Amino acid sequence: MNLIELHILQSFPVSCLNRDDVGSPKSALFGGTRRARISSQCLKRASRLLAHDLHRGFDGIRSRYLLAPFTDALLQAGLEEELAKAKADELCKLFSKPDSKNPDQVTTAVYLSPSEIANISTAIAAGEETKKAIKNATRNDAADIALFGRMVANDASLNVEGAAMFSHALSTHRTDNEVDFFSAVDDRKVDSEDAGASMIGTLEFNSATYYRYLAINLDLLASPQHLAGLSDDERKDILRTFIRSALVAVPGARKNSMNAGTLPHEVLGIRKPTGQPLQLINAFENPVKAHDNGFAEASLVAMNQHLADIERIWGDQGEKLYLTQTPGGIDAFIHQLLG
């Protein structure tokens, strides 16, 4: 497996970047200690949205609303309205189950790209059988589907294995959620009225230094089911956007009340021509201590020591590159990482 790995250390201030079902920051036990957690799904969505803004190649759309786009595309391809609606309905049933309460929707969101919808519709209008048209469609405008993957419950042959692998981010140290008490003042109250707040409440938050990991399977990304239709330079352009987005995107939860926008303080990139993905999270199985110097420095020391221990026992883990030690910053770092 030809891999690029990114080991990221990043500190966030007061925030609730990823909430659970009761609105509290997500957490997990690791090494017998409670840690702050940001789920991989949360990190992937933030990365995908930023990449979509930065590059036209990230145009995949996940939605339950399939009927309208397929109908419009079939009409554009030349079908009469009645036949277009019938074929669009047939396509929806192949991708998911119709929603009995909402006829314009299916029951499960499906990841499709604009070119994929257009290719399917053009092929059907030209007389191709519906299932065959779906299987033969290309989606070179959907690097997000190639990187993050797709599952189609109705037909496993349409599944796409994601070429990118994300871990859940965990704090490198013990982290406990705290409670913020807030109140809101009624601006229309006059001085003669009571001085009480018009609303009070509480919100949970935390602050932590996180280790997060992602890997990119370069062989899979270049496979026929993914982005084989693009040139090497075009795939590198996609990867540049993806890596930048994955490094700088911050989940948007409570961004107006607890804006926690920060950048990683260190990124270790590893290029592996063979092997398998390997996290360095066990560097923090024993939680790091701040010792009045913060967690960032102690986390970097622990990560580097753990990597050195791994290489002493298991051998070299690939070509290594540190962001902060790369002249030219992030652009040069990504350029060297891609080779």
Image: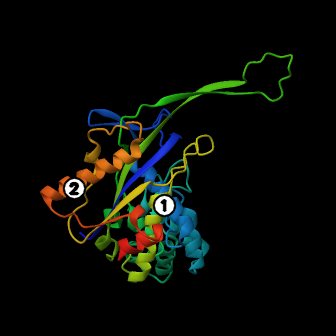
Residue 61 visible in the displayed image: yes
- Which residue is most to the front? 292
Q: How many marks?
A: 2
Q: Nearer the viewer, residue 33 or 42?
A: 33
Residue 241 visible in the displayed image: no
Residue 57 x/y as whole percent: 50, 73
CA separation, marks 1 and 2?
33 Å
**In terms of image quadrants, where is residue 198?**
top right
Q: Quadrant of the N terminus?
A: bottom left
Q: Nearer the viewer, residue 154 or 331?
A: 331
Q: Which amino acid is tagged 1?
A: Arg
Residue 214 x/y as whole percent: 35, 58
Q: Nearer the viewer, residue 117 or 256?
A: 256
Q: Is residue 14 above or below residue 221?
A: above
Question: On residue 308, which mark appears?
Answer: 2
Q: Is residue 121 above or below residue 204?
A: below
Q: Quadrant of the C terminus?
A: bottom left
Circle 1 SS class:
helix
Q: Nearer the viewer, residue 102 or 50?
A: 50
Q: Is residue 213 above or below residue 86?
A: above
Q: Which callout, 1 or 2, points at the residue further toward the start of the chain? A: 1
**In terms of image quadrants, where is residue 173?**
top left
Read off the residue under disc 1. 48
